[in-house]
Image: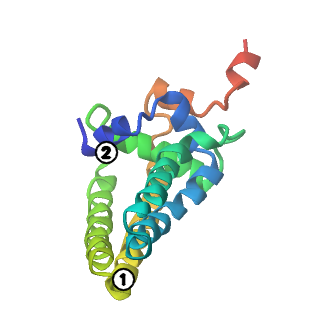
């Protein structure tokens, strides 16, 4: 099992949730998670233990975001393709991905991970510079990763019957006998 698949299980991303997360609004509003978490953890300086309330709300937003929006009517949007590509990437231990897609996503995940170390340090010591630098690394790595996932999806969309089924918007399968 891939690390990413294990993370998906923690967030309880089932078929319906993945489809809802493929809505571009879900993808783009997901970019609010890191600043919210930074702010809420930083708020311990002002709120003390009461900071647990906004921290809990930020974590709830992190979990709820992929569930908030309806499945998209079309998967032609870049953000939708990126989410479908993430699903393909999670499944790479079962359905291998082309060689040109195997290394860069891991490198970009490492860039994001390194950025998170800066963010964590900055938030821990209340220093805005490592926090901002780390956040920039996280976003650069993650957004580039998503772009690679959209490309991966374009290369793999017909690789399996399961992947082909993901391309059918909800309700469309019922219309075609």
- What residue sits 28% from the left and 76% below the top? 118
Q: Reply above or below: 49 against 163.
A: below
- What residue sits 31% from the left and 72% below the top? 115
Disc 1, SS: helix
Q: Quadrant of residue 68?
A: top right
Could you tell me residue 125's position as x and y percent? 27, 80
* Left or right of residue 77: residue 141: left
Badge 2: how crowded within 10 Å, few (<14), some, or many (20+)?
some
**Residue that sits furthest to the top in the current view:** 177
Could you tell me residue 35's position as x and y percent? 48, 69
Disc 2, SS: helix
Of 48 and 138, the residue lying toward us: 48
Q: Where, quadrant-wise, is the N terminus in this rendering?
A: top left
**Residue that sits furthest to the right in the current view:** 175
- What residue sits 25% from the left and 40% below the top? 2
Of 50 and 25, the residue lying toward us: 50
Badge 1: how crowded within 10 Å, few (<14), some, or many (20+)?
some
Spatial CA span between label 2 and label 1: 24 Å
Dot 2 or dot 1, earlier in sequence: 2
The disc label shown at residue 133, or none: 1
Res 6 visible: yes
Of 24 and 35, the residue lying toward us: 35
Could you tell me residue 148's position as x and y percent? 43, 58
Q: Which residue is mark 2?
A: 4
């Amino acid at each position: 099992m891939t690390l990413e698949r294990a993370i998906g299980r923690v967030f309880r991303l089932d078929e319906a949730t993945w489809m809802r997360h493929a809505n571009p609004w879900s993808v783009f509003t997901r970019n609010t998670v890191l600043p919210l978490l930074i702010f809420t953890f930083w708020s311990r300086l002002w709120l003390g233990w009461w900071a647990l309330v906004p921290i809990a709300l930020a974590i709830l937003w992190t979990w709820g975001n992929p569930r908030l929006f309806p499945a998209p009517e079309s998967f032609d949007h870049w953000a939708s393709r990126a989410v479908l590509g993430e699903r393909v990437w999670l499944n790479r231990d079962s359905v291998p991905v082309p060689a040109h897609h195997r290394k860069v996503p891991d490198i970009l995940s490492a860039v994001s991970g390194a950025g998170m170390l800066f963010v964590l340090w900055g938030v821990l010591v209340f220093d805005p510079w490592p926090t901002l630098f780390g956040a920039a690394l996280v976003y650069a790595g993650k957004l580039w990763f998503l772009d690679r996932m959209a490309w991966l999806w374009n290369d793999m969309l017909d690789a399996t019957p399961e992947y082909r089924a993901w391309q059918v918007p909800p309700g469309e399968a019922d219309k075609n006998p």
